[in-house]
Amino acid sequence: MDISIFEVLGPVMIGPSSSHTAGAARLARVAALIAARPFSRVDFGLSGSFARTCRGHGTNKALLAGAMGLAADDERIRNAEALAAQRGLEARFYEEDLDWLHENAAHITFYHADGQTEVWGASLGGGRIRVSRIGGFETDIRAECPTLVVHHLDRPGVVSEVSRTLAESGLNIAVMRLARQAKGQAASLVIEMDGAIPPEVGERVRQLQHVTEVIVIDVS
Amino acid sequence: MYHSFKEWFAAAERRGLSLAQVVLENEMALEETDVETVLATLADRWQVMRAAAEKALDAPQPMTGGLISGQAQKQTHYAETGGFTGAALNKAMAWALSASEVNASMGRICAAPTAGACGVLPAALMAAAELLWAGARQIQDALLVASGVGALISRNATVAGAEGGCQAECGAAAAMAAAAVVTLAGGSNAMVGQAVSIALMNCMGLVCDPVAGLVQLPCSFRNASQTVSALLSADLALAGQDAVIPPDEVLEAMARTGHSLPAALRETGMGGVAATPTGKRLKKELKLDEL
């Protein structure tokens, strides 16, 4: 049997829907980690079933709560709007055609003091998610295990330097995906690890030549 | 490794293990973890399930639309009279209604196998455990067997209402719960299989038709009725009834039936009771399709 019993008895989550509530919270939480900087406003473009059944499933509250870093089983999700007001966070929801992405898709824009971060992703069902695009990069981030996202310049040897640093720290790579905008330009490396990623390892990768940004995503 | 009820039961027999032990060993191998971790997580999940099944008994939960707010409390009061089906079944229904209310109110629940069906397994298992004076260890085994059943339904049929209708959600939960109750009562492996077949036969083709697209109505009543179905399926199996159709074949029928349901009856809120004049009026009044 290749299905874990905790996929059957789980997830532990805030209702009412694993795809429209738990998955929404998780997607926005991962997106906020990817944004990696403080933001004062966040916009959610929603399509398909996500847009149509948003308020009935509390998808808006879940997305907002996730953007504020709340986990999918945090009972404060219900009061996400009040919490956002307390924190001075502004949020906007609008309908957008994202059918190319998924039935339950979201386009999340974070507004920082010095620019924006855009993240596109979807809730796949059962609380599972996928981030498909970050800014100009196509990607595939599921966040089902600790994940390292390394933005860098597309130069020979960067990938092997990153994997060597991880190996030296005793970390095992489960899956590695590389995406680039164009040859020699900005590139993005998504690395799923078998175990937790200690902060100092992220810092060591950040020090490598041609690496511009390192994001550690651990929401398991 | 097992991929069907037949293989699961054969593995247990061949190795002289209980069904629960086979599930436990498979989980440890699959997740590369130890027995303590699995059992601790299982105990945590059971704690969440029980808390949700009790939370709304004396406190109606607020929710968007409010279609099922207060149901658990009403049933709890009524259970004291004994009703027609007895205090135990009425109490079991109250537990199922409570979990449904908590889920609808954006409270904390444990999906089993889905959020919409999260009341069935805890309610049926709590009812059986109370009657049998069952302890934590027995409940643990019952939950392992229930998960084994759920994993097989998920793999060989479906547990998504959008794919298979309510039979795939509350129906699957009833099959899991029936297997759990038979395990708790010390029934044989064959009886576990019979209970699964009976529970799924009794809701074959049940549609998913949430009013106004909310996970409230008829979801809470289906949680209550499938809880009762789980307990009676266990009773039928424990009495030695022969379901005749093996559980693997019932799963096949369930998948086939689910796929032949029109989309209107698969969690779109477009058919069944959702499409009644009252259902449509509620949808319009609640304006839930606006962002």
Image (spheres, coloured by chain):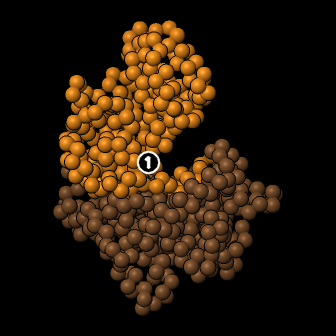
Q: Is residue B282 visible?
A: yes
Tag 1 residue: A127
* Residue situated in front as seen by the camera: A5 or A199: A199
The location of residue B192, given as percent across then percent down, is 66, 68
The location of residue B145, given as percent across then percent down, is 64, 62
Q: Residue at x 18, y 63 (%)?
A: B285
The location of residue A40, given as percent across then percent down, is 22, 36
Q: What is chain A's hue in the picture? A: orange
Characterize the local packing of mark 1: few (<14), some (14-19) or many (20 or more) Cα atoms within 10 angstroms: many
The location of residue B225, given as percent across then percent down, is 46, 74
Q: Residue at x 68, y 61 (%)?
A: B20
Q: Secondary structure at mark 1?
A: loop
Q: Residue at x 43, y 41 (%)?
A: A129
Q: Chain of mark 1?
A: A
Residue A67 appears in which quarter of the rendering? top left
Q: Disc 1 residue type?
A: Gly
Q: Residue furthest front?
A: A200
Residue A180 appears in which quarter of the rendering? top left
Q: Residue at x 28, y 45 (%)?
A: A64
Residue B287 appears in which quarter of the rendering? bottom left
Number of numbered discs:
1
The relative height of residue A87 versus residue B210 in the rendered view (above or below) is above
The relative height of residue A220 versus residue B96 in the rendered view (above or below) is above
Q: Is residue B265 visible?
A: no
The relative height of residue B88 versus residue A47 in the rendered view (above or below) is below
The relative height of residue B282 versus residue A6 in the rendered view (above or below) is below
Q: What is chain B's hue in the picture? A: brown
